[in-house]
Amino acid sequence: NSLAQDNEGNFLAACQKGVTAEETDYLLIKFSATGEVLWSKEYAHAGMENHAQVVVCEEGGYLLVGVTVTGNSYQTYLIRTDDFGEVMWEREIGDVAIPLYAEQTQDNGFIISGYHYNTTTGYDMYVLKTDAEGIVEWENTYGTDESDGGSAVIQLANGNYALIGRIDNGSDTKSGLYFANLNAMGEVILDKTYFGSNKIYGHAGIPHLKANGEI
């Protein structure tokens, strides 16, 4: 699901393994630039784990981000490890939320983005901010009363965030690419929807921040 390079030039691969849903767990593998496996860790947990991603942390170690499913409950699942993959802490957060992207923030916390479902508005863009210990600082959804799509969020140099996602206008033939600039608390400062000639199904990648500050 995810591949990252650490500050020493080694690589981390995050995935999930298991034969049945109940057996599925996260797997984190660290290997050198020549492909030599340095270590491999499997993290046993009740329920089904999916969408495994790895974030290389500035102060050392790694964050595994994904979802754990038990019955009808879909929770964002975080595992913070040291440099050798040993668990420092783990968190299960929220309900019916699927993370698609995560990164470490300037305060050593984490910003996690994806989509959320509820029976009133259907699917919405979803953003979760935690501190360095995985404690929730804020979480927000963005979108309309229609079923919108997921989102990806990056932090800007000024501490604000750029969000990109998919928004629906209630038409069978129209959905747009949604952009928003969020403040440090996740509140929308400005937003814009780009409707083209075709229906948009997803953002297909994270926002790219150019050296001149453009997105």
Image: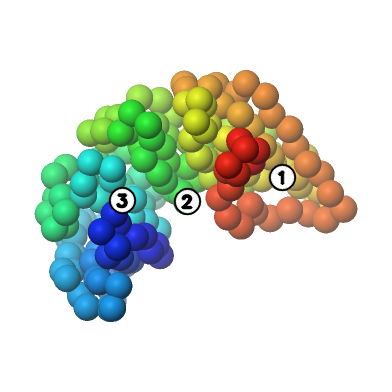
Give the secondary structure at mark 1.
strand
Label 3 sits on a secondary structure element that is strand
Q: Within 10 Å of the Cα at label 2, are there few (<14), some (14-19), or many (20+) other Cα atoms? A: many
Q: What residue is pinned by disc 1?
A: 177
> What residue is rendered at 39% in x and 62% in y?
2
Residue for badge 3:
56
Q: Is residue 54 above or below residue 215?
A: below
Query: Which sits earlier in the primary sequence, circle 3 or circle 1?
Result: 3
Residue 168, image quadrant: top right
In primary-sequence order, the first of circles 3 and 2 is 3
3D distance between C-alphas at marks 3 and 1 = 29 Å
Residue at image coords 68%, 55%: 201
Residue type at mark 3: give it: Val
In the figure, 199 relative to 120: above or below?
Answer: below
Kindly identify the amino acid type of the residue bearing the numbered disc 1: Leu
Placement of the N terminus among the 4 image quadrants: bottom left
Badge 3: how crowded within 10 Å, few (<14), some, or many (20+)? Answer: many
In contact (CB < 8 Å): disc 3 and disc 2: no
- By what rule are the colours in the image chosen? rainbow
Who's the residue at 61% across and 35% down the image? 213
Query: In the drawing, what numbered circle is on residue 100?
Result: 2
> Which quadrant would residue 19 be assigned to in this image?
bottom left
Q: Amino acid at mark 2?
A: Leu
Tag in front: 3 or 1: 3
196 relative to 91 in the view: left or right: right
Alpha-carbon span between mark 3 and mark 2:
16 Å
